[in-house]
Amino acid sequence: MSVGTTATKTIALGAILAIATAGCSSGAASEPPATVAATAATTAAPTASASLDGSKVTILSQWTTDTPQYKILSDVATSLKASQGITVEITPNSGTDIQNVFEASTLAGNEADIAITPLVDKATTWLDKGITVDVKPLLQEWGLLESIKPDALAFFADTSGAIREVPYEGYVWPVWFNMDILAVAGITNVPTSIDELLADVTKLKAAGKVPFVVGGSDWSGQKLFEQIVQGQLSDDQAATVLSKGGWCGDPNAMKGIESFVQLRDAGFFIDGVAGYTADQMNAAYYGEQVAMVSAGSWAFAAAPPAVMAHTTLGGLPVPAGSPHASPTDYQGWGGGFHVSKNGGENKDAVGAVIKAMFAPEILARLAVEANSLPAGNLPADTKIDQPLMQQAVGLGTSVTNLIIPDTLVPGPVAQPMIRATSLAYSSGKDAQAICSALDGAYKQ
Amino acid sequence: MAVPAIGWYLLFMIGPLVSVFYIALLNWPGLISPSTFTALDNFTKLAQDHVFWSAVENTAIQLAIAIPAITVLGFMLGYFLTLNPRGLTVLRIALFTPALISLSARSAIFLAILSPQGLVNGVFAAVGLGDWSHAWLAEESTALASVILVDVWSGIGFTAVLFSARLGAVPNESYEAAVIDGAGHWKRMWLIAFPIIRDYFGVITMLQFLWMLFGSAGSILLLTHGGPANNSTTLSFMVYDEAFNQSKVGYSQAVGVVLFLVGIVGMIAIRRAFRPTH
């Protein structure tokens, strides 16, 4: 019996907010929702399309105002206003809040046409719940389907072949090695096996250096934990355990957790790692307080030039007997364009925005200014001169790309999973306690 | 004349409250999804949910430590203020200031103080006690205690100002006889002042209890996210987490019903405990 009416839902939302978060803020990481309306370039030639002139597209964006992606999107909005008369309203909203904001606005029937957020957490359920639309027919209609990389389309496809969001920016997530700090400890090559890594940890600590930093309390710590465990799992095994749980009952997953515990207990991580966040992690590496970090290509731009100069990118070393032949990394697809039901009804104007974002010069800016790997083809003359980006695209077969956990871990499990992995960074927790916490996150 | 007010009250106060009980009977996987009526299934699951029992335990610990600390220390500070100490105005402002700091700002301050490279660990390192350093908000043994500490810090001063306002109305004659009998401040505070304002003490205790019970989700969301694992998850945070992070709306409201009942029982208990004796 379906009883979920909009009125009931609205009352429910109020009731939950009232009882759970009286007087509570929406989260420290959230950005004040400043709505930015693209203003007309009044001097532009009046070339507005008759069919779209005066139309409007609303965008809820995870790209906050301080990001290069936001600047690119804003410029596209300004250009569209001038050239086609389309008003683009961008509302930036960072962190996990964006998904709650999008769902709440959908409940009110007032959702943005486009939501820019990766396919993680609740966003993995949006197409199934009917609050976003299959973008495959839209891409075909807009003439973009053939110009998007097949692996990007495959990443966002569900089992029925529907595509859950328009792929846009890709990332590489390697391990960064500060070769100057490693050299102080007499290490000249990056480690490729866990045994080598453990030996390097001993040398670094003997030299008074901190080996590794990660945000043990947030998503960055979750990802590193999963990456270490995946060192003992084939992609198929990883897909099963990540999507269904059963960590304690999987011998290979347990071996992976034991690898993690071994590293942690050997002093691999910075002191107090359980309390670190991704921002603090980046700051520690940028400040050359640690020898190694695992961070995605989105962090390249902020790296100080001196640090970049002696940073070598590589993979995370794998244990003996690993199903993977080389050190591992993640390479996947981040922020893309979810098209809401409203957006589906406004598909011509939405298509104009998305097509503009796939213009060759815009993709080139995405690569050069934001250090993102676009889902579309870059112009041949695009010159990527960011040193770390150059290294990242050259990693090639020296690393094994692991299956990405984000689309496998069920949406409702994502946040409990982060809490469970945060426990793993506390000293004294053995593999059994950690796997129990992980399995607890999958409770129905 | 009263009909509009009663209608307004029923619509916006009673309506949401009743809806909590109704929604608790639904299987509702997210506000944007359809729901199905499942009777008491959510409560059956709740009884078997280790996260729920962990939240019950954490809530009990939080209330058992924070409420006495805030009310007793607040009362003592309030009494001190009635003695017109030097710098009273500055002291009142200092005590009231935490109440003027928003939850977000307060949490940001304490994130900086309690982070691994924060003020507390920095001080320990500076005085040669680096081994005492912790990731205060992220370790199993310290996360909940840290949240309680922040709540107590923010609650004591405000409560002291409330108590001082009430204690200021206690007639001086009440103390004078005790002074003649040689009673010190401790005896005057607890044997003279406390019995006189006993009912007021009960009201403050009840308010702190309700604020803490229902409002702890905010501090926990901003400081620990309920972690590590579920070590700082309280019932209030669980209502939020199940609804907004795990898309289990009906289940979250089952927790909400428990929270509501705990609130009612607690209010009755506090009211009885501080009922005027004469």
Image (cartoon, coloured by chain):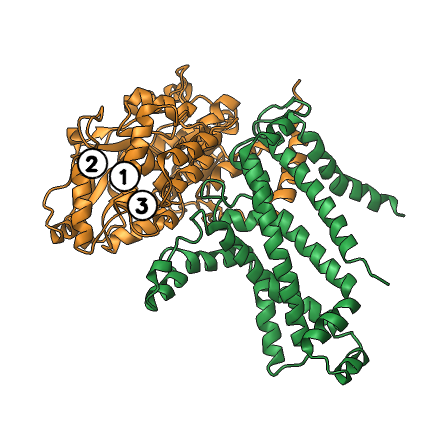
The chain painted orange is A
Q: Residue under mark 1: which chain is it in?
A: A
Amino acid type for the residue under numbered disc 3 = Val
Q: Residue under mark 3: which chain is it in?
A: A
- Name the N-terminal-most of marks 2 and 1: 2
Amino acid type for the residue under numbered disc 1 = Gln
Residue wearing tag 1: A262
Q: Tag 3, which secondary structure?
A: loop
Amino acid type for the residue under numbered disc 2 = Ile
- List the single residue furthest toward the top: A160
- Seen at 53% across and 43% down, the residue is B233
Q: Position of residue A322 (x, y in %)?
A: 22, 26
Q: CA distance from mark 2 to mark 1?
A: 10 Å
Q: CA distance from mark 1 to mark 3?
A: 16 Å
- List the single residue furthest toward the bottom: B180
- Seen at 58% across and 49% down, the residue is B61
Q: Position of residue A421 (x, y in %)?
A: 39, 38
Q: Position of residue A96 (x, y in %)?
A: 46, 40
Residue B260 vs residue A29, the one in the foreground: B260
Residue wearing tag 2: A194
Crowding near the residue tagged with mark 1, few <14, some 14–19, many ≥20 C-alpha atoms within 10 Å: some
Crowding near the residue tagged with mark 3, few <14, some 14–19, many ≥20 C-alpha atoms within 10 Å: many
Q: CA distance from mark 3 to mark 2?
A: 17 Å
Position of A418 with respect to A203 (left or right) is: right
Residue A2 vs residue B177, the one in the foreground: B177
Position of B135 with respect to B261 (left or right) is: left
Report the disc number at residue A214: 3
